[in-house]
Image (tube, rainbow, N blue to C red):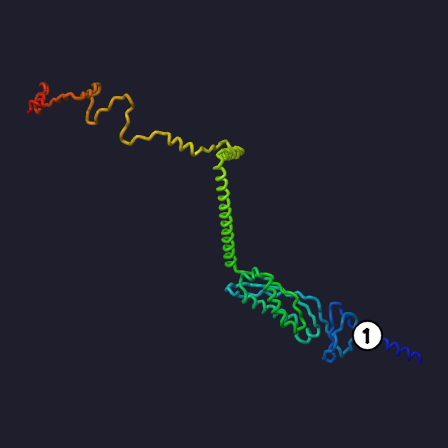
Amino acid sequence: MVEEVLTAAVAAGVGIMVYLGVAARVVKQYERGVVFRLGRLREGVRGPGFTFVVPGVDKLRKVNMQIVTMPVPAQEGITRDNVTVRVDAVVYFKVVDAADAIIQVEDYRFAVSQMAQTSLRSIIGKSDLDDLLSNREQLNQGLELMIDSPAIGWGVQIDRVEIKDVSLPETMKRSMARQAEADRERRARIINADAELQASRKLAEAAEVMSEQPAALQLRLLQTVVAVAAEKNSTLVLPFPVELLRFLERAAPAPAPSGSPVAPEGAPAAPPADTAIEPGAAPTPTPTIEPGATPTPTPTIEPGADPDAPPALDPPPAERD
């Protein structure tokens, strides 16, 4: 009798241990348990710790409540300004309602991934290229709102959405590089022109001050000479005052007209161009006429007459009458 009782007790203990082993469940700290009894959801979500279910009747499903990092595959699209781009992103989300995440959607991870891809393509079509490159914060907020709107009914909360990379065609990259280079060159020229304007104003003020004190210009000249001589050069450049050049130009005599040479003082007058002087012969003196005297008649030689005969003189004016 005692043996039968002991055997029954041992069998009951073993049965209890087997039942506890089958019915016992452990829910981790970052998980929540959803119990279905005969296919029907039981009220209440099992928290972390040790819990029991009815074997063969209840079914426990665990839901991870941690933030999930899901990369969005790169999506290719055309922007609003007709530029083909390829954009990829990453989505951070977590489950806030374990029951809805199990009941309302078949696979909440796959649903969030597909919604993220669709929303990303929609954002690409609504945005310009400049917005994708420089205004990503606003696009991230818009993308997060588009994904979070349907995900609320799935018991999922979108924590954050970030656009990772924007891939551009090579031709577009070269065009943007040329545009950026031209813009930098334009700004450099503007800055250089502004600097020249400021420098010219300062130089004008300095020239005005130096014009009041002539010694200041000479001191500035000496400073320039010192600055040039400080370097290791074998040639020293000294500026020549322009005022001295102008003084020398005014002091120089005026040049004679071209084609009429000027004879020096005391030299004999040159013979006419049509008079030939034989070598060694003395030049014929030019007769001088006293004031009030009668000019000496010039002898004339008739054609065909003897050149050795004395020349005939023209009669005086009184005899002609």
Residue 90, percent across and down?
63, 64
**318 displayed left or right of 250:** left
* Residue 36 sits above or below residue 145 on the image: below
Q: Quadrant of the C terminus?
A: top left
**73 displayed left or right of 281:** right
* Residue 57 sits above or below residue 310 on the image: below
Q: Report whether residue 103 is seen.
A: yes
* Residue 147 sits above or below residue 310 on the image: below
Name the foreground residue: 78 vs 23.
78
- Res. 159 image quadrant: bottom right
Mark 1, secondary structure of its residue: helix
Name the foreground residue: 241 vs 310.
241
Q: Quadrant of the N terminus?
A: bottom right
Residue name at image x 14 percent, y 21 percent = 294
| Marker count (numbered) | 1
Label 1: few (<14), some or many (≥20) within 10 Å? some
The disc labelled 1 sits on which kind of residue?
Leu
Residue name at image x 68 percent, y 68 percent = 94
- Res. 259 image quadrant: top left
**306 displayed left or right of 79:** left
Furthest residue in direction right, as rendered: 2
The residue to which callout 1 is attached is 20
**177 displayed left or right of 279:** right
Residue 103, percent across and down?
68, 76
Residue 168, percent across and down?
54, 60
Q: Report whether residue 228 is seen.
A: no
Residue 206, percent across and down?
50, 40
